[in-house]
Amino acid sequence: MSHDDIQRPLQAVDRLLPDDVCAGTLLGRAWNPGGPTPGPMVVAIRAEGVFDVSARWPTVADVLDELNPAGALTAEQGVFVGRLEELLANSSLPADAHVMRLLAPADVQVIKACGVTFADSMIERVIEERAKGDAAGAVLVREHIMAAVGDNLQGMKPGSVEAIALKEVLQKKGWWSAYLEVGIGPDAEVFTKAPVLSAVGPGARVGIRSDSAWNNPEPEVVLAVNARGETVGITLGNDVNLRDIEGRSALLLGKAKDNNASCALGPFIRLFDQTFCMDDVRQMTVSLHVEGKDGYTMSGESHLARISRDPLDLVAQTISAHQYPDGFMLFTGTLFTPTQDRDAPGAGFTHHVGDVVSIRSGWVGELRNEVEHSETAPPWQFGVRALMRNLAARGLLG
């Protein structure tokens, strides 16, 4: 690797960190290429460097289950494994198993997601459904729906008297939809986004199916929830969505959402401590920037203050009549749904292979990934059995 190759990502290193750098308590996972058995390690990200804490906590889920995760991580010295600048620079490059780099900051947790949690994106889901996944037909459908609904959904509390009254009006007009049911009805949409351990991290390829012609990134806040159902921190995520596939039928949600490399998480989990709390999350802004090899650029923002359901209500609805003994990561939905045209008038936005997607929050840092087809992105091979064998070989399972 040349000096220029190293310097290029180093110029973007600062964007991977929060605005207050390491003032908060940052928990991550990193690939350790050294020793007789290379493998994932749980790390504390500090101004002094990167510290391996796997000897005490073999998994991220173990850290989150502490009574005071931030306090416990701060008190644990760990083993110094490298300079922060080196780790971040390596994580700006395409994945390389021979260097220490950041991984998705979740391991044995289930990866869940809530959808249709913002009025604007809710309308777009209805449009997808009515257009049956046809991007060109969505223009006319959008005009009809906005004429029927207007601003009636803005600020409406799901399950409220006003929401029930609007439902009756829309049903009479023939505009009711499964998306409106979960958007303004009493029950949130909760689904499983990705299998355990399948999420990709910073710098990795993020996947879209090659047979999708209408798709988009979904920049989201992702809650880190422990086995007791307590939300103890957050990270960022890209809930990659294939609009043409989901638009054909809501029953194709799994095919639209869960594909190889279609879930990105990172760069770290910022744990709740004296510098950061849930009230800060409720006021967060998540920014998105897409830059294509063709010179195309697109930017947008998602404001958590405009979410229709409180994040902790989403956690409660996810738990509901379930148990999560290893905790879960919960995507909270997005306000951002791009409608501007890219390839042709009326065709809307869709990804091209090679697009660089950057999702950022000043509280957490930046998650940056390059778009690839799911079929040709690096295959997911490190599953639960591989993790258990790896931890056992390293003497980390008690």
Image (spheres, rainbow, N blue to C red):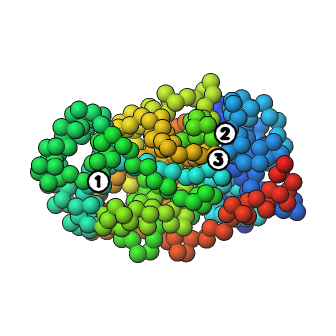
Task: Say which label, 2 or 1, has the lower sequence index.
Answer: 2
Residue 120 falls left or right of residue 174: right
Which element type, helix, strand or loop, lies under badge 2?
helix
Report, in whole angstroms, how far the alpha carbon at label 2 lies from the one at label 1: 35 Å
Query: 259 above or below 107?
Result: below
What residue did someone put label 3 on?
A: 326
What residue did someone put label 1 on?
A: 178
Q: Residues within 10 Å of mark 1 (few under 14, many from 20)?
A: few
Q: Nearer the viewer, mark 2 or mark 1?
A: 1
Residue 369 in view (yes/no): no
Residue at horizontal 69%, vertical 61%? 384
Quarter of the picture containing the N terminus is bottom right
Query: 206 above or below 377?
Result: above
Q: Nearer the viewer, mark 3 or mark 2?
A: 3
Q: Position of residue 150 (x, y in %)?
A: 17, 43
Residue at horizontal 18%, vertical 37%? 165
Task: Say which label, 3 or 2, has the lower sequence index.
Answer: 2
Specify the amino acid type for callout 2. Leu
Which element type, helix, strand or loop, lies under badge 1?
helix
Residue 206 falls left or right of residue 67: left
Specify the amino acid type for callout 1. Ala
Report, in whole angstroms, how far the alpha carbon at label 1 lies from the one at label 3: 31 Å
Report, in whole angstroms, how far the alpha carbon at label 3 lies from the one at label 2: 9 Å
Front residue of 102/36: it is 36
Q: Position of residue 91 (x, y in %)?
A: 65, 55
What residue did someone put label 2 on?
A: 64
Front residue of 11/173: it is 173
